[in-house]
Image (spheres, grey):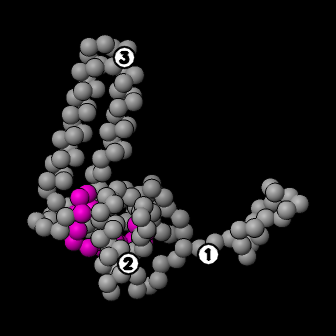
């Protein structure tokens, strides 16, 4: 985008704005290296969204709600070991926080406030809505290996 050199704070002109993201009728979802974008129903390929594995998968369907404004159904696959590993790590971090809280009430609360959000943000548990714009839902919660394998599938076809 270019701006008027006489006013560096001027907004971009309408013809310079990026085009709106739209989903064609024959397309179920779009993706990039960070998220997946879909409408009402998204059926993802049989690849574990947490680990990128393709064997011994469990298929799940999750309905995600965006307040009162809408919902999206996401059908995805997970490997049992990835689910249990994530749960185990999160449980250990919560236990450590609880122990620190009991040992030293003041320091435990401060460390708990720092550790718990980190624990829940670092370990993916499945898809979640991060944004809704013009009828499209932006989802994250997918490991990079999963998104990379989707890219390889699209490139082969």
Magenta segment boundaries in residue numbering = 36-52
Q: Specify the quadrant that holds the N terminus.
A: bottom right
Secondary element at tag 3 = helix
Q: Residue, x 36% and y 21% (percent of image)?
A: 109
Q: Specify the quadrant that holds the C terminus.
A: bottom left
**Predominant secondary structure, magenta span:** strand
On the image, numbered disc 1 is attached to which residue?
Answer: 19
Q: Does 89 appear above or below 105?
A: below
Secondary element at tag 1 = loop
**Alpha carbon of mark 2 to alpha carbon of mark 3: how far?**
48 Å
Q: Earlier in the sequence, mark 1 or mark 3?
A: 1
Q: Is residue 21 left or right of residue 27?
A: right
Q: Residue, x 27% and y 51% (percent of image)?
A: 125
Alpha-carbon neighbours of circle 3 within 10 Å: few (<14), some, or many (≥20)?
few
Q: Is residue 49 inside the magenta stretch? A: yes
Q: Are marks 1 and 3 in contact (CB under 8 Å)?
A: no
Q: Does 114 appear above or below 26?
A: above
Could you say where residue 61 lies in the image, as x and y percent from the top left? 25, 64
Quarter-of-image position of residue 77:
bottom left
On the image, numbered disc 2 is attached to which residue?
Answer: 28
**Alpha carbon of mark 1 to alpha carbon of mark 3: how far?**
50 Å
**Alpha carbon of mark 2 to alpha carbon of mark 1: how far?**
19 Å
Alpha-carbon neighbours of circle 1 within 10 Å: few (<14), some, or many (≥20)?
few
Could you say where residue 73 lies in the image, as x and y percent from the top left? 33, 67
Q: Does 75 appear above or below 93?
A: below
Q: Nearer the viewer, residue 146 or 97?
A: 146
Q: Earlier in the sequence, mark 2 or mark 1?
A: 1
As drawn, the label of residue 107 is 3
As drawn, the label of residue 9 is none
């Amino acid at each position: 985008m270019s701006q008027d050199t006489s006013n560096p704070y001027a907004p971009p002109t309408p013809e310079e704005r990026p085009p709106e993201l739209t989903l064609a009728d024959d397309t179920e979802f779009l993706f990039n290296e960070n998220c997946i974008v879909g409408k009402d129903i998204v059926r993802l390929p049989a690849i574990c969204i947490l680990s990128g594995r393709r064997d011994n998968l469990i298929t799940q369907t999750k309905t995600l709600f965006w307040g009162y404004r809408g919902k999206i159904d996401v059908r995805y696959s997970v490997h049992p070991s990835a689910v249990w590993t994530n749960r185990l790590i999160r449980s250990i971090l919560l236990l450590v926080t609880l122990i620190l809280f009991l040992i030293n009430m003041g320091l435990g609360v401060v460390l708990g406030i720092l550790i718990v959000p980190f624990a829940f943000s670092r370990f993916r548990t499945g898809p979640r809505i991060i944004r809704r714009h013009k009828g499209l839902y932006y989802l994250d919660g997918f490991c990079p290996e999963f998104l990379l394998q989707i890219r390889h599938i699209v490139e082969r076809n």
